[in-house]
Image (cartoon, rainbow, N blue to C red):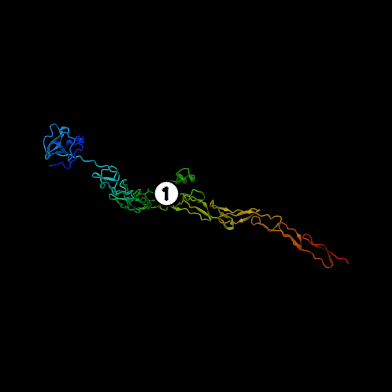
Amino acid sequence: MHHFANMICCRGLPAAAAATAQVYALHAQGFWFGVRTDDGSNWVLPGGGRASYLNWSPGEPNNGANACGYMVNDRDGQWDDAPCDYLLPFACDVPKMPKCPAGTAPNGFACDKCPAGTYAPKDGTKGCADVKCAAGKTDHDKDPATPCVACNLGVGYTDEPGNVGKCKPVQKCAAGKEAVPTRTKNAVCKDCASGTFRSSTMAQFVAKLGAGKACKAWSAECKAVCVDDADTQRGCSTCQNCKRTLLQLAAPDATKDRICLPCQTDAKPGGKGDAWIVHYFQGSNPPGKQCVRVAACRADQEETQQPTMTSDRECATCKYEGATEFKDAGTGKCRATKKCADDEYVSKEPTKTSDRECKPATTCSVDQYEAKPAVKGLTNAVCSSCATCPSTHTETAKCGPTENTQCAGCTTCTASEWLESACSNSAQAVCTACHT
């Protein structure tokens, strides 16, 4: 009866001595380790090979044929022999587990490639079935050699191990609702508690970045504050002098916070302070007191009085009749239109938003005359070239600053006269009476 068919005993048996210290305490008497003999002289291993290393106690072996060797605990690992059906524990020499590369896991004494949805690190000791990506993580690249990646909190989740690819999308909570985000469960939206809110903007932010989850507490009641920038512009010496009272323009609810707004004055000249100002106080005591939006001057008006904490902006229409004023686009103020000087004329009439334009009046050259004289400060002169009298005419008046050349027809002598001097451009014909 051979009990040692599956035992692997001390191959190249010098290794047995090294193993002795670790295993000889298994039993008070000793333990089988796999050597046996059929003839009482030749000792063989479980695989049938002859044992080349023997470590018998003095006087051993002494049981003849069909005996098995066992290691004796109280003899420093030396051997004794006994009948093979003698009841003793046994020790086996088990081969070491293999060292597997990343992406594979040990299976007995071999390395198996693990499927997607797992992470098998280098030299791991667990099988593929035990290295699945845990719930809340995913095998994003389908590569068992790379670590599993945690789902983005509040954006994705996985509720079972071994997930591959993207995490499942988390349900998006609408404004006024919240959910406690986890990586292993889908969101369960619930209403914001009383006194808290979650706006649509917050919901979009959470859905995009997966940051934050909770409804936020409403802001405190509106109160008086100091607005430093506006205070400096207004020239206030202390914050107290420039204190703004914040009024509640909109009450909070589950989807939005309380909206508080200071009634501020316009600190910039010309009513251009839209970055600061928008409202003024109207009424005396709550609940009648409220912030009212400051009026804006029309395009054809100027600001005559800036708004204050208790009054609106005042505007006046520019005097466009008779073209006496226009509105300066740069300052927003009404300005008197320009008057052209005596030696100028109006080149462009004014509009509601532009001034009158003037140019120097024209002076006619020496060979010109003013066909239409200038009106000082209004219209320009119209110059025309001086005329030249034809050969059949004579010049009676030269071209001047305001008159053209004057010409008259040549004189014709009568039958009783003779032509003493012919007509020219500069002289009339001279006729003299004939003598009889």
**Left or right, 194 with reference to 369:** left
**Left or right, 66 with reference to 277:** left
Observer able to see residue 246: yes
Question: Residue 205, relative to residue 23: is it above or below?
Answer: below
Question: Which image quarter is the C terminus in?
Answer: bottom right
Q: Foreground residue, 378 or 6?
A: 6
Give the percent coordinates (x, y) of residue 392: 76, 63
Residue type at numbered disc 1 = Leu
Q: Foreground residue, 59 or 222?
A: 59
Question: Which image quarter is the N terminus in?
Answer: top left
Observer able to see residue 370: no
The residue lying furthest to the top in this view is 58
The residue that appears at 63% across and 54% down in the rendered structure is 359
Question: Residue 84, relative to residue 175: is it above or below?
Answer: above
Q: Foreground residue, 293 or 386?
A: 386
The residue lying furthest to the bottom in this view is 415
Residue under label 1: 246
Question: Residue 93, relative to residue 162: is it above or below?
Answer: above
Give the percent coordinates (x, y) of residue 5: 16, 42
Tell me if mark 1 has few (under 14), some (14-19) or many (20+) residues whose alpha carbon lies within 10 angstroms of its own.
many
Give the percent coordinates (x, y) of residue 71: 16, 35
Q: Foreground residue, 124 or 63?
A: 63
**Left or right, 164 with reference to 60:** right
The residue that appears at 62% across and 56% down in the rendered structure is 346
**Left or right, 347 with reference to 135:** right
Q: Is label 1 in a helix, a strand or a loop? A: strand
Total numbered circles: 1
Give the percent coordinates (x, y) of residue 90: 16, 39
